[in-house]
Image (tube, helix red, strand yellow):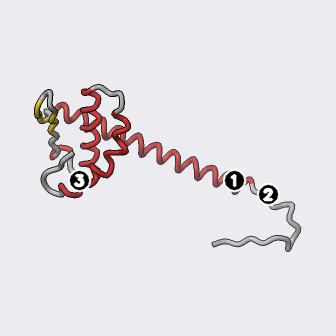
Amino acid sequence: AVAVGRRSPELTEYLEKNYETNIEFLKGKDQAQEERFLCEFVISSFLEVMSLEPESIEVAISNVDTGCKILPDDELKVLLDSVKAQKAEIMQQIKEDTSHKRSRVDQSQQETDFSYLEPGQGSVTTD
């Protein structure tokens, strides 16, 4: 993957750093699925690293069979919507996981029973 333009070194570094993690998803995929996944990866990288407005993103796909093509705006919009939906889903999952962990901590604090201790027995310390 290659990025050109403003802040391209940071974007290229991000792409290279995260490519290996994402390449596992490509195993067994056909060329169309691979292209879509890689385009979504690149778009999410743009949004993550550069905080760009979606309207300022252009993506070109180049391969041996079909040559080079710039994604039309309508295809780019579909991919952007998909990336945004995936990000929203991940954020919701994080929010739910955090909320679930808090409720477990609250519940365990409520369930702690120190009635077996005699007055003056044991000690409690807080940070």
**Residue 11 image label:** 3
Q: Give above or below for 65 relative to 7.
A: above
Give the residue at x 58% y 50%. Answer: 101
Q: Nearer the viewer, residue 30 or 8?
A: 30
Whether residue 50 is visible to the viewer of this picture, yes or no, is no
Graded by Cα atoms within 10 Å as few (under 14), some (14 to 19) or many (20 or more), the crowding at tag 1 reads few
Percent position of residue 10, x then y: 23, 57
Q: Does residue 78 appear left or right of residue 120 in this picture?
A: left
- Between the residue at mark 3 and the residue at mark 2, the CA separation in whole angstroms equals 53 Å
Badge 3 local density, few (<14 within 10 Å), some, or many (20+)?
many
Q: Is mark 2 in CB contact (under 8 Å) with mark 1?
A: no
Secondary structure category for the residue under label 2: loop
- The image shows residue 124, relative to residue 66, as above or below, that is below
Instruction: Quadrant for residue 90, please give it.
Output: top left
For the question of whether residue 25 can be seen, the reply is: yes
Quarter of the figure that contains the C terminus? bottom right
Q: CA distance from mark 2 to mark 1?
A: 10 Å
- What's the amino acid at mark 3? Leu
Sequence-wise first label, 2 or 1: 1
The type of residue carrying mark 2 is Asp
Measured from the top left, where is residue 41 in percent x and y?
Answer: 29, 41
Q: Find disc 2 in the rendering and name its residue.
A: 113
Which residue is labeled 1 in the image? 108
Percent x, y of residue 6: 14, 56
Q: Work out which residue is located at the far front of the displayed protein and give it.
A: 64
Between discs 1 and 3, the one toward the N terminus? 3
The nearer-to-camera label among 3 and 2 is 3
Residue 15 pos. (x, y %): 27, 49
Identified by mark 1, the residue type is: Ser
Q: Nearer the viewer, residue 117 or 48?
A: 48
* Position of 36 relative to 114 (above/below): above
